[in-house]
Image: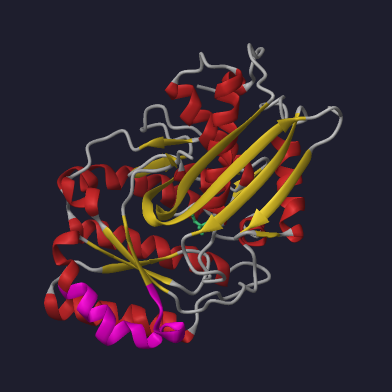
């Protein structure tokens, strides 16, 4: 499928009004996307675990309107109008209008809420843009009931990508790959695809406990961070490394080789932050407690031989990754040794999930 497939020909049906509701999860990248070209085209391919409990639920009530010149929508976040989010939606609508030509036909009442605590430092843009895109695709499906599932999900991922790059990996589960790679069939810069190769059962139920080290706003947004990869002295080497890591992961995912998995995942996390520290201007998103946690995880792994590892997103929080058969002991370790480094001792137990779901009612 290509971008051209996402331009609808015509609609057979225009309902007066309707209501759709979807829940979409967050995701955590194992091979990181960092650096992009216009518009939201990744500089390198990435792969992520789709999460389960960290999710955004969005509903849209839509009603036909007279004026078809302008976008019209209300936006409510956790039950309250949120004006400062409206420009983001406006920009998103402008960006996707060609692909969803019904956007000016209706007034939309958009309501959204997150399962994770407000301002937890967990990026809600991935789950938020994925949930919004699923709702818009559900509306388009009512206008064009012939659309098949393959197009429905690929286009939802495509729209989510135009909202926030990594959001395109939140539409499906459980392992999603995004970005053209010559050795990965059907891989695309335009949308995420379910990882197409064999995946060992151990990865199907992998756990991710998110340690909330710093809940405040990041000093540097990921948009700024991506842009700093232009002219970055290590950019080309880094992009190549991501391609190579995807190749290296193929037998690792198939065999369930956890030692090799850990090496790539931790190296990817530290490389992401190394890119930030070597940008111009340079910046650091890790906090002292991020490093305390990393050292504790390494010490624990060395002492117990339990295959627990970490990854980081563009922030100070730590994602602790481990196979579900070690859940009990790892949760004890987190509670006794790592929770002290979290703001108010807070962390979220999550794990691999299956992607966006429609909510009835
Ligand atoms: O989707 P964005 O623009 O917020 O970028 C996300 C980048 C990382 O989370 C750091 C890595 C990734 O692949 O998700």
- Rendered position, 169 above or below 211: above
Q: Nearer the viewer, residue 332 or 304?
A: 332
All told, the count of numbered labels is 0
Magenta region includes residue 336: yes
At a point 38% along the width and 49% down the height, the residue shown is 50
Residue range (magenta): 329-347
Q: Residue at x 27, y 77 (%)?
A: 297
Magenta stretch, overall SS: helix
In the rendered view, does 358 fall on the left or right side of 263? right
Give above or below for 16 relative to 122: above
Residue 189 in view (yes/no): no
Does the rendering let one see residue 253?
yes
Q: Residue at x 65, y 69 (%)?
A: 220
Determine the image quadrant of residue 351.
bottom left
Q: Nearer the viewer, residue 61 or 328?
A: 61
The image quarter in which residue 258 lies: bottom left
Residue 41 position within the rendered picture, expressed as x and y whole percent measured from the top left: 59, 40
- The color scheme shown is secondary structure
Q: Is residue 119 magenta?
A: no
Residue, x 41% and y 35% (percent of image)? 193
Q: Position of residue 299 (x, y in %)?
A: 23, 82
Where's residue 182, x and y in %?
41, 31
Front in this rendered view, residue 85 or 252: 85
Query: In this view of the protein, which residue sits in the foreground, 192 or 35?
Result: 192
Query: In the image, 168: left or right of 253?
Result: right
254 up-or-down from 125: above or below: above
- Left or right: where 90 falls relative to 255: right
Quarter of the figure with residue 332: bottom left
Rendered location of residue 118, percent (x, y): 55, 69
């Amino acid at each position: 499928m290509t971008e051209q497939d996402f331009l609808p020909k015509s609609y057979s049906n225009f309902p007066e009004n309707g209501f759709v509701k979807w829940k979409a999860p967050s995701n955590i990248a194992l091979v990181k996307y960092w650096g992009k070209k216009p518009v939201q085209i990744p500089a390198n391919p990435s792969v992520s675990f789709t999460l389960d409990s960290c999710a955004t639920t969005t509903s849209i009530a839509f009603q036909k309107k007279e004026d078809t010149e302008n976008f019209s929508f209300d936006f409510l976040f956790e039950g309250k109008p949120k004006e400062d989010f409206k420009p983001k939606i406006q920009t998103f609508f402008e960006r996707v209008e060609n692909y969803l030509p019904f956007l000016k036909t209706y007034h939309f009442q958009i309501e959204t809420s997150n399962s994770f605590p407000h301002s937890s430092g967990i990026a809600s843009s991935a789950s938020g843009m994925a949930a919004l895109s699923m709702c818009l695709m559900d509306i388009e499906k009512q206008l064009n009931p012939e659309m098949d599932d393959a197009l429905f999900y690929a286009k939802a991922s495509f729209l989510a990508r135009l909202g926030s790059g990594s959001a395109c990996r939140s539409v499906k589960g459980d392992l999603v790959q995004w970005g053209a790679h010559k050795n990965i069939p059907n891989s695309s810069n335009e949308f995420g695809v379910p990882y197409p190769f064999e995946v060992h059962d151990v990865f199907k139920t992998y756990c991710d406990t998110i340690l909330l080290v710093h809940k405040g706003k990041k000093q540097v947004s990921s948009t700024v961070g991506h842009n700093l990869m232009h002219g970055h002295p290590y950019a080309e080497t880094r992009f190549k490394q991501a391609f190579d890591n995807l190749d290296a992961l193929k037998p690792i995912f198939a065999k369930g080789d956890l030692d090799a998995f850990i090496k790539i995942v931790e190296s990817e996390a530290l490389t992401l932050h190394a890119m930030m520290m070597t940008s111009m201007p340079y910046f650091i998103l890790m906090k002292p407690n991020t490093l305390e946690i990393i050292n504790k995880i390494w010490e624990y792994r060395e002492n117990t031989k339990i295959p627990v590892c970490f990854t980081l997103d563009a922030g100070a929080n730590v994602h602790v990754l481990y196979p579900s058969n070690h859940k009990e002991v790892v949760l004890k370790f987190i509670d006794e040794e790592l929770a002290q480094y979290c703001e108010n001792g807070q962390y979220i137990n999550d794990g691999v999930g299956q992607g966006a779901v429609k909510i009835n009612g």
